[in-house]
Image (tube, rainbow, N blue to C red):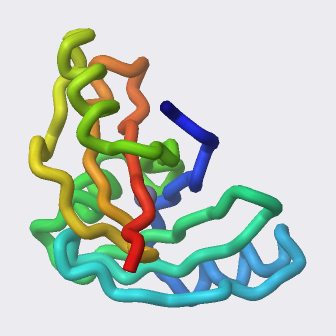
Amino acid sequence: MLKKIEHIGIAVKDLNKANEIYSKILNSKPYKQEFVDSENVMTSFFKIGDSKIEILDSRDEQSAINKFIQKKGEGIHHIAFEVEDIQSEMQRLIEEGFHCLNEIPKKGADNKLVCFFHPKDSCGVLIELCQEIIT
Ligand code: ZN
């Protein structure tokens, strides 16, 4: 089951500048900043009600975020849906013909297991499924 839009990911060139801009828009400060090893990106997170904005700043030329920015410039990078059971939702979408980019969920930012689906199948928007890691 998809529970909600967990967050929207925005690719930026300058994390500090983006933090300033989104602090003004949302009238609050990011509640955390975190380096994500698996993606080589620095992230910061803002809360808006039940959803979040995830700011993504590449720390590596080879990273997916850097490639995205080279190609398209700054902007919305993905939409993340929170799921209860990432394996079963992945399976469901794969059976529907969507292309999963990592068939083994990996550890993403903010204590989540994540997997991504190719934007070519979803009208140009990269889809993330995420499940809270319960510790
Ligand atoms: Zn995300």
Q: Determine the residue positioned at 37% across, 82% down.
A: 42
Is residue 96 positioned above or below 88 on the image? above
Q: Quadrant of ligand 1?
A: bottom left
Q: Nearer the viewer, residue 59 or 4?
A: 4
- In the picture, measured across the screen, residue 131 lies left or right of residue 1, that is left
Is residue 27 positioned above or below 48 on the image? below
Q: Quadrant of residue 70?
A: bottom left
In the rendering, at what x and y percent does residue 20 appear?
A: 71, 85
Q: Determine the residue positioned at 59% across, 40% down.
A: 3
Q: Nearer the viewer, residue 19 or 112?
A: 112
Judged from this view, the residue extending furthest toward the top is 96
Q: Quadrant of residue 61?
A: bottom left
Q: Determine the residue positioned at 38% across, 80% down.
A: 135
- In the picture, measured across the screen, residue 86 lies left or right of residue 125, that is left
In the rendering, at what x and y percent does residue 41 appear?
A: 30, 77
In the rendering, at what x and y percent does residue 35 appear?
A: 33, 87
- In the picture, measured across the screen, residue 109 lies left or right of residue 14, that is left
- In the picture, measured across the screen, residue 25 lies left or right of residue 103, that is right
Q: Nearer the viewer, residue 13 or 87?
A: 87
Q: Determine the residue positioned at 15% across, 40% down.
A: 101
Judged from this view, the residue extending furthest toward the front is 135
